[in-house]
Every structure is written in C-alpha cells, then in structure tokens.
Image: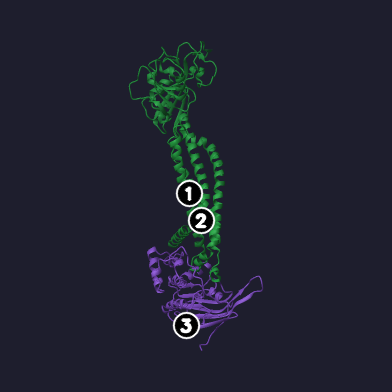
Chain colours: A purple, B green
C-alpha cells in the first residue's frame, strides 16, 4: 500500500457508527465523509460527546464502522480482520493521546523504541536506538533520551509520546486532544512538533477543543450530532 | 519464519522488561512456585536415588542388566567342562557353590545350615552321596557354616561387589596352596563375634583346609558367604566335588552379551547331555512396575504442591494484567497483535517459572551435596550420591508447566483488552 504525492490518503464515505448500550441505540457518527491528503492537517472540533474520539477510533482502525466505506491510499479497508488492522496501525498510523501513556520504568528512548518492538518485523537493538534518537531529535528532546518520565515535564512527556508516534514513519498522525493536559505555551510546542511531521508529508488529524490550535491546521471540521461539516474560513 | 522469530524475540524482550520493572512481585510469585518445583525436584531426585539403590542391590545379587546367566545342572563331568571352558576368560565367569564349615572340628556350627548369624534355622544335616541325610551331631562350638563359591575369574564385572575391607581375589597370580577367601559382611560378622580357628572343612576334600581370609565385601547376601579361586580350592578336592548336588552345590555361569563362550559351553554341555537354562538379567524391567507406582504416588503429592505454585503465579499474573491495562492497550494501538500480547504475558510467567526451576534445582542439588557430605558415611545410600539429571529435567518441566498454566488466563485477559481503553482514559 504505497502513497503517491497528491493522492488521497484517507477517504471516508458515509461512515456511521451506532452505540448499542443498555439504553436505546445512539448514533455517534451519521454518514461522515472525510478526506485527508499527505501533508495535510485537519482539526476536528466539537462538543464533548459529539463523537470526535469515536471518529478517530474508526480512522485509526481501533474500531470498525457499522456502515460506509473507508479507503486508505485507495484500498478499501472497511471490513478488515484484526490481524491486518494491527499491521496497518503499525505501518500507517501514529497515535498521540491526551494522556501520554509512557511506561515509567523505561527511559524516553526506550519508550519511543517500544513502538518498534511490536512483532511487526524485527529490528536489531542498535537500529531501534538509532531510530528512537532520530524521532526524539525531530521533536527537539534528544537530550532527554536517558531520562525517565518521572523526571520530565508534561510537555516533554507529550513530545516523547509524539516521538513514539513518529518513530515508525507513519503516513497519518492521529492526535486526540494532545494539549488537553498542558498549559498554552507547552501546548503550542506540542502542536509545533505535530505540524513538523506534516512538513515531511505526514497527514495529521487533530481532535481538539482549543480554537487557537485548530486554527493552525489546514482545515477545520465541526462534528455536531454525528455529522461532520467543514468550517468555512472566516 | 523471520516474523515468528521477531515475535518471539519481542515477547522475550518485553517480558524481561516486565520482570525487571516488577522485581518484588516476581519474587513473591516465585516463592510459592519455588516450593512446588522443589517438591517435584526432590521427589524425582529421591525416586532416582532410591531406584539406583534398589537396582544396585539387585546388581549385587542378580548381576548387572544385560548379563546372560546360565544355570547348569551339576553332574560328574559338568564342573570340569565348565571350568576348563571359561577359565581365563574375561567375558565369562563360572561360580561353583558348595557348603563349608570353618572352625573347630566335630562341633555343631554357631549357625547351623549357614543361617544368618542372628537367626536359627535348625540343626545341620550331613547328606551322603546316596541321598541319605543325618542330623549333625556334636556340641555347639566355635565354627561357622557358610556358602563357599569357587570362581574361575573376576565376577565383579557382572556383580559389582562393594569392597568393605582388605582386598579382592587376584586371578593373575599363581594359585596358593592355602585358599584365599573373601568373606561377605554376614560371614565377617560371624568371624568378628566368634573366635574361630582357621580350619575349613568341605565335603569331598581329602583333608581339612587352612584358608587365608584376605578381605570383606558386600555381596547383598544376608547369609554368610565366602568367595575363593577355583584353582586354589581344587588343590584340596577334585573339580567334580565342587558342585555336588548332595551338598547343595550349584553351578552358574555369567556371560557378557553375545560372547562366543556361551555357544561353546552350551554345545559342550549338550554333548554331555547336561541340561542348562539361560536367562538375561533385566532388573530394571522386573522392577519397572514397582518403580512406576512409587513415582506416581510421589508425583501426585508433588503435583498438588505445584498446583499451589501455579495458583500463586495465576494470582499475581491476573493482578499484573489488571495493573497494565493501559500499557497493553497502548501496545495494541502501536500495532502489537493480540497473539503477541498474550505471548508477552506467557513469556513473563514462563521466564518466572524457569528462573524458579533453576533456583529450586540449585537449592536441591546443594542440599543433596550437604546431606551426602554429612550423612554419607553412616548412610551408604547417600554416600557419594550425585544429583540425578532426571531431577533437573523434571524441575525444568515443572517450571515450564507452572509458567504456562499460571500465565494462560492472564495471557487471554491481556489479549482481550480493547484499544479504546487508551482513547477513553
């Protein structure tokens, strides 16, 4: 699955997702259409519970849509078995979450290299370390390679998490409120790091509540009652 | 193949990281498992040592496994043919049994009928060539009745007697006029309890014989027994007298497997019309059922103890997975397949099981060494005893089984953790 410049990276058409809980079924995504091209950054905004994270779960292959079509670099992956989904998550996606999920017993470099020890191919230790250092360098914290999470600030920890997402050279970065737990200044540094990846051709989908961060993306999409609409630039 | 290897390596690396990150918890889960594996190792080691001791005793009396044993019916020419055929051979030894009394003449021995020294089997009888037997008269005196076995060669190749003191018979020297005797423990006991003159009477001998007592061995026989060279005894009585059925004489020949001497002797005896019976010693097979039953009983007990260890690993494993839900969800998010997540947990419990097994094997080997050093002199069973490799293998298998059983359910739990856990956190 290779990507040609200018080609659509992600194409969602009519995606629906219904939550079937104990109460009445609730439509979370209602015919969502979304396209993302290489190097493009897309902000998804909306109220809490509007389905932003569910949309990200579907895009990131954590969850399957109930209906609709999902094309990744032109291939239909709407109904993908878990084994192939895991492989695509490893080769195409990088994830950044609101909480950093760093393993406290590992150093920053080891936390980044952890994404390389996932059973999808094998890299020697030296190569893993080299790539981890390169990823840390991309987000500007190579000097913290040997530090453990407990010794780092929130912003530094989130940048380690971004380095972890970048270390496998993903096609798309999915960030779920990555600045939610950070102050404005640190949040800006984190958004800088994410946008740095788009300059190298990586697509970015950012779920955020922060208007300023959203404004820095190529496009802003509103998710209201499961329906995604593009915000017209002011 | 490369992918499998990558997954295996990944699970080992992450498993080791997990163990290093939770040293105390790993140690605690090892404690209960240690006792279980130790029980298996001790049972296996005990069973192996007991088996060897049992087989060792059987080797003393029956011969080592694989030995071909020929029983020959005594007859006028039989002893001559047997001794002349196998004399000087290393692959075949004939033993000719007769009854002998050492001590004062004209008295009833202290152990009539060659009974063990502390038992009384009734009065001795003297049997004549015509089959008639009469009770031996005379007052009890300082004399010991024993079985005397005349040998054509070194029988220890087939029956590995333990030398207790003195020396064994030397078959390379010129035969002595005074036959050299090696006593077994029971006979030596009799000689230490009684002041017995060195005067030996053997049925068929033209005169009383003055023997030389040169050593003591353990031959596994509870009756008094002495061994001598055939050629030293035949200075005093004809070879045919060595196996006189009227005096309880027996002829037995032991062969190494596939030696031509067996065929040659069989042919010669058949020519004389002498009946023979041949069998192969297989003590291991004969005792197999007893040993298997013994092991089964002990292993059942050890298995129960091991189960407690498994429960310990299971308990700790489940707690650990519960604690690492986010880590496993994150690993799935970065592309780790469910099977590898299960493999990580299994690798951790398996490594814990193997580490525990290594510790238990080391501890029991060290304990055995200490016990052997301290008690080896008083307990022959423990003298110079080596840690049996079977016990090591059993310990490793127990460690692996405990690791897999204890890790199985936590592994399934880990593999089932939804990735969305990290999204909702």
Q: Which of the pair B76/B162 is nearer the observer?
A: B162
Residue B216's place in the image compared with A52, above or below, is above
Q: Position of residue B392 (x, y in %)?
A: 46, 45
Quarter-wise, where is residue B68 in the image?
Answer: top left
**Can I make out residue A36 in this image?**
no
Q: Which of the pair B381/B25 is nearer the observer?
A: B25
State left or right for residue A33 relative to residue B101.
Answer: right
- Badge 3 marks a residue whose secondary structure is loop
Mark 3 residue crowding within 10 angstroms, few (<14) / some (14–19) / many (20+): some
Q: In the current view of this chain or complex, which residue is farthest to the bottom? A: A234
The residue singled out by tag 3 in the image is A216
Same subunit, labels 1 and 2: the answer reads: yes
Q: CA distance from mark 1 to mark 2?
A: 17 Å
The residue singled out by tag 2 in the image is B25
Residue at the image position 56 percent from the left and 52 percent from the top = B311
Same subunit, labels 3 and 2: the answer reads: no
């Amino acid at each position: 699955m290779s990507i040609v410049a200018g080609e659509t990276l992600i194409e969602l058409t009519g995606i629906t997702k219904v939550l079937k809980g104990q109460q009445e079924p609730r439509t979370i995504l209602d015919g969502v259409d979304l396209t993302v091209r290489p190097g493009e950054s897309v902000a998804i905004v909306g109220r809490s519970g509007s389905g932003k994270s569910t949309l990200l779960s579907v895009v990131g292959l954590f969850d399957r849509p109930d209906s609709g079509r999902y094309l990744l670099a032109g291939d239909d992956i709407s109904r993908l078995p878990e084994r192939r989904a895991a492989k695509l998550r490893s080769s195409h996606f990088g994830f950044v979450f609101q909480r950093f999920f760093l393993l406290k017993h590992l150093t920053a470099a080891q936390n980044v290299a952890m994404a390389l020890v996932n059973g999808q191919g094998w890299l020697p230790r030296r190569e893993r370390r080299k790539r981890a250092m390169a990823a840390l360098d991309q987000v500007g914290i190579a000097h913290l390679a040997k530090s453990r999470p407990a010794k780092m600030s929130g912003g530094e920890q989130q940048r380690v998490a971004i380095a972890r997402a970048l270390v496998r050279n993903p096609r798309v970065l999915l960030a779920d409120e990555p600045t939610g737990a950070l102050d404005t200044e640190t949040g800006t540094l984190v958004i800088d790091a994410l946008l740095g990846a788009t300059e190298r051709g990586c697509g970015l989908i950012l779920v955020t509540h922060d208007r300023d961060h959203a404004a820095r993306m190529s496009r802003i999409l509103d998710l209201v009652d499961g329906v995604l609409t593009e915000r017209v630039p002011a | 193949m490369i992918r499998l290897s990558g997954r295996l390596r990944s699970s080992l690396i992450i498993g080791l990281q997990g163990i290093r990150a939770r040293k105390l918890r790993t140690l605690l889960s090892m404690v209960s498992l240690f006792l279980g594996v130790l029980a298996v190792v001790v049972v296996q080691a005990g069973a192996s040592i007991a088996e060897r001791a049992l087989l060792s005793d059987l080797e003393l009396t029956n011969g080592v496994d694989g030995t071909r044993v020929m029983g020959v019916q005594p007859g006028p020419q039989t002893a001559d043919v047997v001794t002349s055929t196998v004399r000087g051979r290393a692959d075949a030894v004939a033993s000719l049994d007769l009854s002998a009394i050492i001590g004062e003449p004209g008295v009833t021995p202290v152990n009539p009928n060659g009974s063990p020294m502390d038992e009384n089997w009734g009065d001795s009888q003297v049997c004549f060539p015509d089959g008639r037997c009469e009770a031996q008269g005379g007052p009890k005196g300082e004399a010991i009745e024993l079985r005397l076995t005349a040998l054509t060669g070194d029988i220890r190749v087939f029956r590995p007697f333990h030398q207790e003191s003195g020396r064994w018979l030397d078959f390379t020297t010129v035969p002595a006029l005074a036959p050299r005797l090696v006593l077994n423990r029971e006979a030596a006991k009799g000689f230490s309890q009684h002041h017995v003159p060195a005067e030996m009477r053997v049925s068929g001998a033209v005169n009383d014989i003055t023997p030389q007592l040169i050593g003591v061995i353990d031959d596994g026989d509870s009756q008094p027994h002495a061994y001598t060279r055939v050629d030293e005894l035949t200075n005093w009585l004809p070879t045919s007298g060595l196996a006189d059925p009227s005096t309880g004489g027996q002829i037995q020949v032991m062969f190494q497997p596939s030696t031509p001497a067996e065929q040659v002797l069989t042919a010669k005896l058949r020519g004389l019309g002498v009946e023979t019976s041949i069998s192969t010693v297989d003590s291991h097979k004969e005792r197999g059922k007893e040993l298997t039953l013994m092991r089964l009983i002990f292993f059942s007990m050890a298995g129960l103890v091991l189960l407690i260890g498994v429960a310990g690993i299971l308990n700790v494993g489940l707690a650990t997975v519960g604690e690492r839900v986010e880590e496993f969800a994150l690993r799935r998010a970065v592309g780790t397949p469910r099977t590898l997540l299960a493999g990580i947990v299994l690798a951790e419990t398996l490594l814990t099981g193997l580490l525990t097994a290594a510790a238990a094997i080391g501890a029991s080997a060290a304990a055995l060494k200490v016990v052997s050093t301290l008690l080896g002199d008083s307990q022959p069973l423990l003298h110079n005893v080596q840690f049996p490799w079977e016990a090591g293998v059993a310990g490793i298998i127990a460690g692996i089984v405990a690791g897999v059983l204890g890790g199985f359910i936590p592994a399934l739990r880990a593999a089932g953790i939804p990735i969305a856990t990290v999204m909702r956190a």
